[in-house]
Image (cartoon, rainbow, N blue to C red):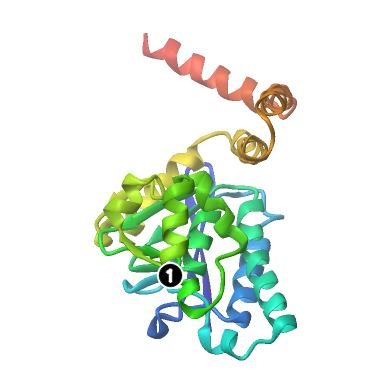
Amino acid sequence: MPVEISRKELGTGIVVTITWDNSQKLNIVDSAAIEELAAAVTGLDGDDTIRAVILRGAGHKAFIGGADINEMAACDADSAEAFISGLHGLMKAIRECRVPVIAAIDGYCLGAGMEVAAACDIRIAGENAKFGMPEVKVGIPSVIEAALLPRLIGWGKASYLIYTGATIDLRTARDWGFVERMVTSDSLFEIAEDMATEIAKAGPAAIRIQKQLLKVWEEEPLEEAIEAGIEAFAAAYETGEPQAMMQAFLAKKKGAV
């Protein structure tokens, strides 16, 4: 089952689009797909020309419709642990990607799909997007990156989704804070590219430092997070990027007067 990786020159570098294509089966993922997707993400780590990543599912019916129930139904405790650890590995790769990852969500975004979207930095969705965590309906708990949901939408809403297995529409997902932008399905990828372009226009070192810092903010107490920010600010000057970009800004402003 193919993972398509495309590269486009935008802003100051390259924006990579990773497309998962199992569209005949709502882009569900099995172990082989999970491994291939994780490899596609981790394979970007050494490329300093990359400015942002867009993650999408093929077609308009699903972003990722969930994990493969046929495979999970055949699991025992040991193979279940191996399967879910592999799935976590994919989401960890997304979270540890050095540049921002944008989820371009069309259609169903369920279970593992919603967790993959939660692992991304920004979520944009088309009008037909639907979200849910239906795991309890097939006898398993929601785990791994489902732990991000209370941070994104609050404990009560996360509990509602996880306990009931309910499916919510795009407007609800936006109102709850899971999705940053609502767009039409036809414009979804174009708008995702526009957002990636804006990221790619920024200082590449600053963006990478910012992504690392956001993860610290998520995990550390407030005072430690603030201290990490002070260190990150100073570290940015070691790259030479602030000096060059600020001088260019000032020169442009002076020339406009």
* Residue type of the residue flagged with mark 1: Gly
Which residue is labeled 1 in the image?
Answer: 57
In the foreground, 94 or 111: 111
Which residue is painted at 30% across and 52% down in the image?
172
The reply, left or right, for residue 177 in relation to residue 49 is left
Q: Is residue 53 visible?
A: no
Residue 57 rendering spot, x and y as whole percentages: 43, 70
Relative to 126, residue 150 above or below: above
| Image: 25 above or below 180 | below
Q: Quadrant of residue 235?
A: top right
Q: Residue at x 31, y 71 (%)?
A: 60
Where in the figure is residue 108, as x and y percent of width and height?
Answer: 36, 69
Q: Is residue 178 left or right of residue 147?
A: left
Q: Give me the residue at 25% from left, 59% from top.
A: 127
**What residue is drawn where x is 34% and y is 56%?**
125
State the count of labels. 1
Q: Position of residue 17 (x, y in %)?
A: 49, 61
